[in-house]
Amino acid sequence: MKTFYAPASMGNFCVGFDALGAALQPIDGSLLGDQVSVEAAERDTFNCIGPYAEKLSADPKDNLAFQCLQHFKQHVAPNMPAVAMTLYKGLPVGSGLGSSACSVVAAFAALNDFANTQLSQEALIELMADFEAKVSGGRHYDNITPCYLGGLQLTADCIPSKAISVAHDESWFYVIAYPGFALNTAKARQALPQQFSLHHTVEFAQRLSGFCLLMQSGQFDKALSMMKDSIAEEARAPLIAGFSEAKDALPALGAELVSISGAGPTLFAICKSEQQANAVQQWLQQNYINEAGFSHICRLDAQGTRELKDQK
Ligand SMILES: Nc1ncnc2c1ncn2[C@@H]1O[C@H](COP(=O)(O)OP(=O)(O)O)[C@@H](O)[C@H]1O
Ligand SMILES: N[C@@H](CCOP(=O)(O)O)C(=O)O
């Protein structure tokens, strides 16, 4: 049996709505994401386990990972033998941490390895995006490609190969805090303005292009100063209890930036020292998250989706 782990990701990365995303690795070495195992079996079976399994429908047909299995057998690898698939649901649904992308990416990575297809990386990414689009209320790649490829990705349908890896400052700490309640991505997309002025649109393009070029040339502090979410944050902040208070309070503790991870409600803060990250995390634990929430101090995950070798 092989097990594939897909890491949590932060869509938008503040300055790149639907176009930038980053994979996360907690600095304590823990895994923050979903896992999918596949092994040969007499007939196809699906099992969903893990801390967030019970938040999903008990009917496999409703589960994205099982839908990936069905699609794969019907359209990609029709001669593939029967398999037993197990999804370990390690991320809460509707968290802003790319939970649905994690299940889809881990499932297709495991199936693709099992069936040893000749699918190109781009074709696989498109397939993954098709399935995430089924639930998220829009086709966007900013969870799929960082989750699959790791790092910080500039990503869109119109980008050759769907993603360009963007350099990042490896000394930055990302404090993430999931407050313990769900915010459905499709609902959070409906809250967005449907139109922006020409000025607004041009400024978005200027910020995103300036940010990416500065990061790519190692001018990380200048890039950080350009990070502003002019598309989603204002419309979504009222849907996230405590976000505005945290955004006001955390800079005094050393947060260089406070923004929404994906569609929320997870919040992320960028800090330049571990001491500041600890202070920010402590504030968030006391003031932002409830008993069902959690927080982690993270770096960006450079590997993306990978086989967990020590699993049997
Ligand atoms: N394996 C799965 N992982 C996550 N969500 C799933 C899965 N299978 C089905 N779903 C459904 O997809 C939707 C995902 O919601 P969404 O808000 O997009 O989550 P997230 O932002 O965490 O990716 C939910 O309605 C959930 O029930
Ligand atoms: N760009 C998307 C990202 C959604 O991420 P999720 O983790 O909340 O599913 C958006 O902002 O809608």
Image (cartoon, rainbow, N blue to C red):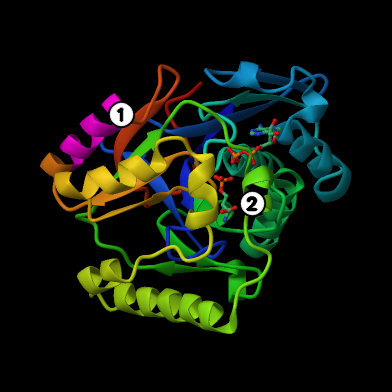
Q: Residue at x 37, y 52 (%)?
A: 302
Can you give x and y, in whole percent of width and height, for residue 254 in the image?
A: 16, 48
Q: Residue at x 54, y 65 (%)?
A: 19
Q: Which residues are magenta?
A: 277-287
Establish if 232 lies above or below 158.
above
Q: Is residue 133 left or right of residue 37?
A: right
| Observer-nearest of 189 and 148 | 189
Q: Can you identify the residue that label 1 sits on?
A: 287
Main secondary-structure element of the magenta-colored stretch: helix
Q: Determine the residue positioned at 48% across, 34% down.
A: 33
Circle on res. 219? none
In the picture, measured across the screen, residue 43 lies left or right of residue 93, that is: right
Q: Quadrant of the N terminus?
A: top right
The answer to whether one can see residue 297 in this image is yes
- The question of residue 58 being in magenta is answered with no
Which residue occupies the foreground of this view, 209 or 32?
209
Q: What crowding class fits label 1: few (fewer than 14 Cα within 10 Å), some (14-19), or many (20 or more)?
A: few
Dot 1: element: helix
- Marks 1 and 2 in Cβ contact (< 8 Å): no
Q: Mark 1: which amino acid?
A: Asn
Ligand 1 lies in quarter: top right
Q: Mark on residue 191?
A: 2
- The earlier-in-sequence mark between 1 and 2 is 2
Dot 2 falls on a residue whose secondary structure is: loop
Q: Mark 2 Cα within 10 Å, few/some/many (few <14, many 20+)?
A: some
How far across and down, in percent of the image, does residue 57 sit?
74, 21
